[in-house]
Image (cartoon, rainbow, N blue to C red):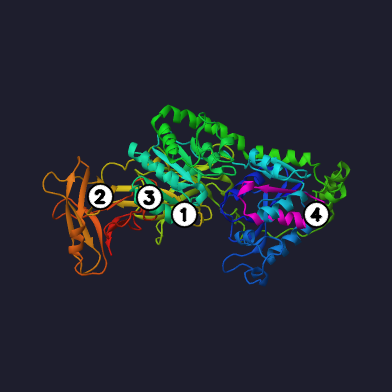
Amino acid sequence: MKISFLLQNAYGIGGTIRSTFNVAGALAARHDVEIVSVIRSGEKPRLTLQPGVRLINLIDQRADKGADLDDALLGQDSQYIPPVEAKGAHFSALTDQRVSAHLAATDADVVIATRPGLVMYLAEFGQDRYLRIGQEHRIYGTHEAAIRAYQDASIPHLDAHTTVSEADAVTHREQLPGIKTKIVCIPNGCPPSEVEPADPESKLVVAAGRLIPVKRYDLLINAWAAVAEAHPDWKLRLYGRGPEQAKLRAQIDRLGLNESLTLMGAHSPIETEWAKGSIAAVTSREESFGMTIVEAMGCGVPVVATDCPHGPGEIISDGEDGLLVPVGDSDAIAKGLIKLIEDDELRRTMGAAARVSARRYAPERIADAYLELIDDLGGPRRTGDEQATTAKPARPTLRRRLRRTVGRIVRPLRRQAAPPREKKVLKDIVVRKPLRPVASCRVNSEGDIVVSVDPKGVSGENLSLTVTRRKENKPAAVPLTPPSEADAPWTAVLKRTELRLGEGRWDLHVVRADDRARRRVVAHLPEGRRLLTLEPLPGSPFTWWIPYSTVDGYLALRAWHRDGHSEARALRPDGNSLTVEGALYGVEFASEGTPLLVGTPRGEAASEVTAEIELVDATTFRATLPYDRLRAARAGEESATWDLAVRLAPDAAPIRIGRLVGDIVDRNKTDVYPGVAGVRPYFTVTSDLAVNLP
């Protein structure tokens, strides 16, 4: 049986795309499966597509090179899709043309449409020779009126329509009485997590999703103000991007939560980030399903979620694998978070139960639900002759196979072909398969980075892993250990006690000694959970490594290597001064003399500023820099910037203050502080601390 999924754009990272990729991959183990992307916007999908699933594109809109970028029909309105849906999904007269032609010509037995506009196309242009199934990934009542009306008119022309919650299936049946279309609930599929399970001792709460009003992250931020006051050692990370970002940033600044609440931006895959937390938070006023809930639970993280329509209550068993709290109540959200923060055993047992509960949504189970639905609808509609035209050829009979075997033996004997010339120049050439390494990595308890290379992407025997600093050609090599059993990964260990990596960004390659083939490593799952609690090695120099995935999907390391380092653990700006709390690594405070916080100006006119350092203990310190000193040192410049450092003695070299310890690669993008009294502290691209006076 051939099953075809219609996607608006397979090159994003949204929940519908993830769910479709997951279920298509599970179905492909048993059937012929394709995903038809109406629009192609990238070179390759950002999410992993199983090898058994074909990806077909109808319209190529890749930047600068798409074959359809100049098609005049792109600028003409769709004649079938209401404007609000057409605008949001980039449907046009060209999508009308391409989708209708595809639906007329497809040889699929089942076509599944994954968003309202595609459901409308399937109802309008779909053929009776195949089953037509629509999907609803939102809630019935949340669509704009025109979309709702068009979709309601389309659903009766389908064989089935699925929702992701049972409650929404009931609503659809109530709103569309008497139609023959079968309406059932089939939730989204979410594969079991491949990452190391979350540590219940982690003092981190994680939330993730689009920064849009329906997610009510403003409530979460208000709730966090109460949590941070009661438990200042806990942190909250919010992953995602969207139109609410500036508003949420202003709220964080206003509440003074910059040290305990971080806007992390978008991150894919998100499961490595769920596993860093011990609690997850979902504060939506409505959820069609709750893919993020299932993902977090699959990593062993209990979720505190608002009991909103329709998904959370069907996923979470309140008090067993998570907590449900009233919708729109920031106090209730805070109480739920504090309950889990203060009860270590409850957090641990709920996390374990959450992992078990998440297995209900394994893609294989969701695939079974779709196959059961297809059977209930009567199975494929094409006749036996029609299916035979696209089926795999039947195996030849035994007699025919014997004749072929005899022919292969006898025919060469009848020919008197000249023997081939003996190879001379090319006799020792062996053609090897190209390298296509894909790897995950994990930081172990020693702080070493264990790299696991998928065996399907490498071949040969003498393989090594190299790390090369960008703009240099001096790789450091580590041997790759072959697997001890089939399908196990090749492994290499980057030991932080042995390997000295200079400061900068390092790319990873697999190198084969036999033919000197060298190929950059594609990132699968770079895990950095243990970096949250890992300490730098004692003594000097200070070194720190963070594995990460580059924007183009390759595995890389960011490394710092300094004789000494001053870590900025907390910044506390107020109306008059900036207080820096930090710790020294690789160096020690002198027994005599007064250490100073030093601000070195970048401009020629401004002068150096200093402030005395107060020692909290042998390695930690506190220093307060009055803003008046910055204004006096500006020397008439319109804008001045100072880089901050610690000077242990009058003749000692300054030790830059930065924020390097932990798992965050680019602090300048995440650790953001407001300007107070015209002075703004910030972290540079090298994660060092500076202050700016505009």
User: Which label number is shown at residue 244?
Assistant: 1
Which segment is the magenta one? 118-146
Q: Position of residue 368 (x, y in %)?
A: 70, 38
Query: Earlier along the polypeptide chain: callout 4 or callout 3?
Result: 4
Q: Position of residue 147 (x, y in %)?
A: 66, 55
What kind of residue is marked 3? Ile
What kind of residue is marked 2? Gly
Dot 4 lies on which element? loop
Q: Is residue 201 visible?
A: yes
User: Which label number is shown at residue 564?
Assistant: 2
What residue is shown with label 4?
A: 127
Dot 3 surroundings within 10 Å: few (below 14), some, or many (20 or more)?
A: many
User: Label 1 vs label 2: CA separation?
Assistant: 40 Å
The nearer-to-camera label among 2 and 3 is 3
Say if the magenta span includes residue 139: yes
Picture quadrant where residue 123 is located: bottom right
User: Label 4 vs label 3: CA separation?
Assistant: 53 Å
Dot 4 surroundings within 10 Å: few (below 14), some, or many (20 or more)?
A: some
Q: Is residue 596 left or right of residue 45?
A: left
The nearer-to-camera label among 4 and 1 is 1
Q: Is residue 368 left or right of residue 530?
A: right
Dot 3 lies on which element? helix
Circles 1 and 3 in contact, beta carbons < 8 Å = no
User: Label 2 vs label 3: CA separation?
Assistant: 33 Å
Query: Earlier along the polypeptide chain: callout 1 or callout 3?
Result: 1
Say if the magenta span includes residue 238: no
Dot 1 lies on which element? loop
Residue located at (44% from left, 54% from top):
245
